[in-house]
Image (tube, rainbow, N blue to C red):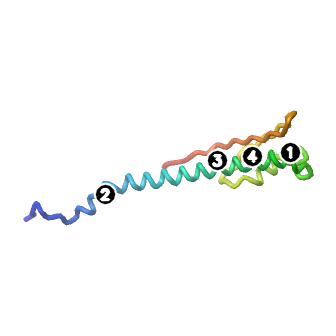
Amino acid sequence: MIAWDDERGTTAVEFAIVSPVFIALLIGILYLCLCLFLIGSLHYAVEEGARCASVRTTVCKDATTTVAYAQSRYFGPSSPTFTYAAGACGNSVSGSINYVAQLG
């Protein structure tokens, strides 16, 4: 006979209710950290590319070497697209990346 005050197994039921939410939150935090790392790394590479084009003219002689230098400063899982433009008052390097998070 089953008694109504028997509490065996309640911990397992509570864990089954809470664990999907906790695991989804954990995976979401990991994806957010990865995205923030990608943004920070891309920002660093663009800054270093523009600085190299402006200051280190022996290393970054033209658009090709400047883009290659910016790509060497990027530390992410996929390869971004960098563009270089020389302006009247400075050099400009921009970068863009597409990242797809597959959830299944």
Task: Give the Cα distance between marks 2 and 4.
Answer: 46 Å
Question: How far is the residue under mark 3 from the one under mark 1?
Answer: 23 Å
From the viewer's perspective, is the residue at label 3 or at label 2 nearer? Answer: 3
Among the 4 quarters of the image, the one containing residue 18: bottom left
Q: Determine the secondary structure under disc 4.
A: helix
Q: Nearer the viewer, residue 16 or 33?
A: 33
Q: Earlier in the sequence, mark 4 or mark 3?
A: 3
Write down the residue under mark 2: 16
Chain-order first, disc 3 or disc 2:
2
Q: How packed is label 3: few (under 14 Cα within 10 Å), some, or many (20 or more)? A: some
Instruction: Please give left or right for residue 91 compared with residue 26 in the image.
Output: right
Mark 1 and mark 2 lie on one chain; the one further toward the N terminus is 2
Upstream in sequence: badge 2 or badge 4: 2
What amino acid is labelled 1 in the image? Ser
Q: Does the CB distance between marks 3 and 2 fall below 8 Å?
A: no
Identity, as a three-letter code, of the amino acid under mark 3? Ile
Image side of residue 20 versus residue 64, left or right: left
User: Distance of mark 4 from mark 3, alpha carbons?
Assistant: 11 Å
Question: Going by the picture, which residue comes out furthest to the front?
Answer: 89
Mark closest to the chain's N terminus, 3 or 1 = 3
Location of residue 33 with respect to 10 vertically, above or below? above
Q: Which residue is mark 1?
A: 54
For label 4, the residue is: 46
Residue displayed at 30% across by 54% down: 17
- Assign a secondary structure to mark 2: helix
Place of residue 96 in the rendered image (x, y in percent of width and height, measured from the top left): 69, 41
- Nearest the eye: 2 or 36: 36
Q: Nearer the viewer, residue 32 or 64?
A: 32
Observer-side mark, 4 or 1, equals 1
Indicate whether 70 appears above or below 11.
above
